[in-house]
Image (cartoon, rainbow, N blue to C red):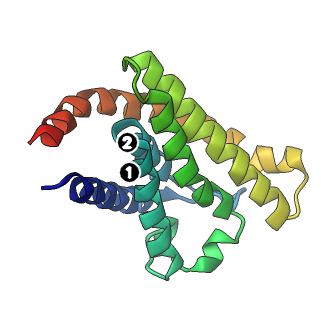
């Protein structure tokens, strides 16, 4: 299989993983932002794929949702989701997976490096863009948006950072073998 086809296959596979993990969605009564598995998927994508492939995997996911396929949290789809209160979190996903991958590129991979990269990509970037759009769309002040759209999710997201970092360390040798074949 040629290199471009392998990258497209991996991007599609990780878009599919993101779809499956987005169906893990727990609505919170005090916030328009549900707890989901999407950030775990983007952290895995950024940790395991090359930067452009990680970016593409999240673009595929967003494109499927934007055209109306119900791949977003709560089995929702449509371009309106991207412009709603949770859209910033979704739109951050390609950037976050790309940055995570870039932070890991051509450096010795360790559990600590994975954790730091996933915190920067999977939490900081997603929260900044997500809270920014939540502030604008829901017409909240920044403090209220952080209280509703970031703070309640931090403990769970740090668990996702640890889980994705652990899984990435275990899956990296397997992916390297497939790249050689």
Note whether residue 157 is visible: yes
Q: Nearer the viewer, residue 140 or 49?
A: 49
Q: Nearer the viewer, residue 145 or 83?
A: 83
SS at badge 2? loop
Left/right of residue 154 with respect to residue 19 in the rendered view: right
The reply to whether discs 2 and 1 touch (Cβ–Cβ < 8 Å) is yes
Figure check: 146 above or below 168? below
Q: Residue at x 45, y 41 (%)?
A: 43
Figure check: 51 above or below 176? below
Q: Nearer the viewer, residue 66 or 71?
A: 66
Residue 13 placement (x, y as % from top left): 28, 57
Q: How many marks?
A: 2
Q: Residue at x 41, y 20 (%)?
A: 107
Q: Quadrant of residue 23?
A: bottom left
Where is mark 1, residue-wise? 53
Residue 85 placement (x, y as % from top left): 72, 65
Q: Nearer the viewer, residue 28 or 40?
A: 40
Where is mark 2, residue-wise? 50
Q: Is the C terminus in the top left, top right, bottom left or bottom right quadrant?
A: top left
Q: CA distance from mark 2 to mark 1?
A: 5 Å
Q: Is the N terminus in the top left, top right, bottom left or bottom right quadrant?
A: bottom left
Q: Residue at x 35, y 42 (%)?
A: 49
Residue 72 placement (x, y as % from top left): 49, 67
Residue 123 placement (x, y as % from top left): 60, 38
Q: Residue at x 91, y 52 (%)?
A: 141
Q: Quadrant of residue 175?
A: top left
User: Disc number at residue 15?
Assistant: none
Left/right of residue 39 with respect to residue 131 in the rendered view: left
Tell me the crowding category of disc 2: few under 14, some 14 to 19, or many 20 or more residues within 10 angstroms, Cα based: many
Note whether residue 156 is visible: no
């Amino acid at each position: 299989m040629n290199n471009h086809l392998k990258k497209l296959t991996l991007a599609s596979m990780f878009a599919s993983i993101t779809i499956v993990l987005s169906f893990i969605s727990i609505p919170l009564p005090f916030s328009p932002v549900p707890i989901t598995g999407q950030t775990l998927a983007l952290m895995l994508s950024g940790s395991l794929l090359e930067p452009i492939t990680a970016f593409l995997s999240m673009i595929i996911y967003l494109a499927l949702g934007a055209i109306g396929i119900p791949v977003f949290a709560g089995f929702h789809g449509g371009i309106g989701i991207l412009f709603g209160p949770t859209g910033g979190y979704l739109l951050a996903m390609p950037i976050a997976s790309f940055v995570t991958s870039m932070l890991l590129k051509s450096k010795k991979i360790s559990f600590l490096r994975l954790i730091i990269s996933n915190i920067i990509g999977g939490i900081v970037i997603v929260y900044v863009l997500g809270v920014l759009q939540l502030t604008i769309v829901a017409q909240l002040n920044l403090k209220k948006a952080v209280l509703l759209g970031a703070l309640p999710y931090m403990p769970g997201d740090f668990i996702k950072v640890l889980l994705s970092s652990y899984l990435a360390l275990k899956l990296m040798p397997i992916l390297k073998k497939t790249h050689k074949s």
